[in-house]
Amino acid sequence: MLIAVPQTMHFAEPLALTSGASIRAYDLSYETYGQLNADRSNAVLVCHALNASHHVAGIYAGQTKSEGWWDSMIGPGKPVDTNRFFVIGVNNLGSCFGSTGPMHANPDHADGRVYGADFPVVTVEDWVKAQALLLDRLGIQTLAAVMGGSLGGMQALGWALQYPERLRHAVVIASAPNLTAENIAFNEVARRAIVTDPDFHGGNFYQHSVVPKRGLRIARMIGHITYLSDDVMNEKFGRQQKDAPTLPAARGSLPPEGALAARGGPLPLDAGVATYKYSTQDVEFQIESYLRYQGDKFADYFDANTYLLITRALDYFDPARAHGGSLTRALAQAQAKFLLVSFVTDWRFAPARSREIVKALLDNQRDVSYAEIDAPHGHDAFLLDDPRYHSVVRAYFNNMAQEVGV
């Protein structure tokens, strides 16, 4: 079993951000797996998505249930084989898993006050820049590949544009060149759930010793719905009820006051059919129980300000914007070879979005491979062990290994 060891790199030099602000001093948490070869040609940077971290693979010593978020993909003998490649996972600035973020002390305040709402806006471009600085410290000038799924895929794309000479391959999985209006809308609803929580306190809830858990729960529930396909939700939960429904005290009785709005309006009444009693506190369906469980778990470990920062970074990413909206012109500067993978049932980052990137690369006569996997799992498919998906990635990295001589 691969044993992961968290590390931290401190940077005293200010980091200038895309917004015009800067971070005066900061830490980046990271992990590495495998061995860097003599000519430093086998390094693979893995970029994480919204609620993940630098803990990409393996387990922590003495913690049997601590697998990295992409442990099915990365490790000895796995599609990204750490017997051949030196894999690096970095926790992004603004996150809540070790790298400097809103819950850390702001060096601009002598009293040790945390950043809170004062943490500056960060973008995908800022994360890529910080990752490049960490690689400089590690003595790695050229990467065999940058790889990521979802928001991580956007970072891989960003690497190919910001540092085209520093990577040989970009592996972009279940991602997009920018967010659709619908995706931005989902992010905004989730953010509103957080900022309207009475415990949010304008982002400075740390000073009040509270956590806006209600908002975080709802944000996670909204997000989780979009990560799954309709087929998977029906297969796993269908219309199964958690417990037997409670019959009303009298025929045709209405739910308690306040429950109508929660359920979307009055229940249909029929003189010959009894209706179920409904309370806003009840969990009637298995899918409700599952979403509440996911929300509760998320609210216990994730930071509210981090959620706002990362979803905004998602919204802002749009490399074509600086090129008159032309993705083809934006990708003209890319030099890497590309592998793109999408999943048919992923409606949040649909295959059509990956095909936009493929077309723009082909317009520029770049070397690109593309796989569209008919997996039933929706957006979450990029995290799962689908044999066809893993076979594509394995074959691509096998070819890469021969190219770099490992």
Image (tube, rainbow, N blue to C red):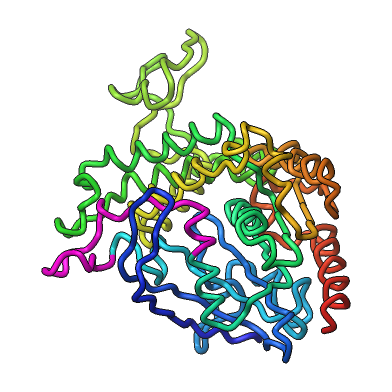
Question: Is residue 12 or residue 1 the one in the foreground?
Answer: 12
Q: Position of residue 280 (x, y in %)?
A: 34, 33
Name the residue at 86% across, 73% down: 398
Residue 188 against residue 6 in the figure, above or below: above
Task: Locate residue 299 relative to residue 244 in the image: left or right.
Answer: left
Is residue 93 covered in magenta? no
Q: Position of residue 54 (x, y in %)?
A: 52, 71
Magenta region: 104-129
Question: Is residue 56 or residue 238 the one in the foreground?
Answer: 56
Question: Is residue 378 or residue 88 the one in the foreground?
Answer: 88
Name the residue at 27% across, 37% down: 196
Task: Locate residue 246 relative to residue 233 in the image: left or right.
Answer: left
- Location of the C terminus by quadrant is bottom right
Q: Position of residue 347 (x, y in %)?
A: 67, 37
So how many labels did they put on this image?
A: 0
The quarter of the displayed image where residue 247 is located: top left
Name the residue at 69% across, 49% down: 174
- Location of the N terminus by quadrant is bottom right
Q: Main secondary structure of the magenta part?
A: loop
Question: Is residue 115 or residue 294 the one in the foreground?
Answer: 115
Name the residue at 72% across, 88% down: 37
The quarter of the displayed image where residue 395 is located: bottom right
Q: Position of residue 260 (x, y in %)?
A: 37, 21
Residue 158 against residue 195 in the figure, above or below: below
Task: Locate residue 267 relative to residue 374 in the image: left or right.
Answer: left
Furthest-top residue in this view: 271
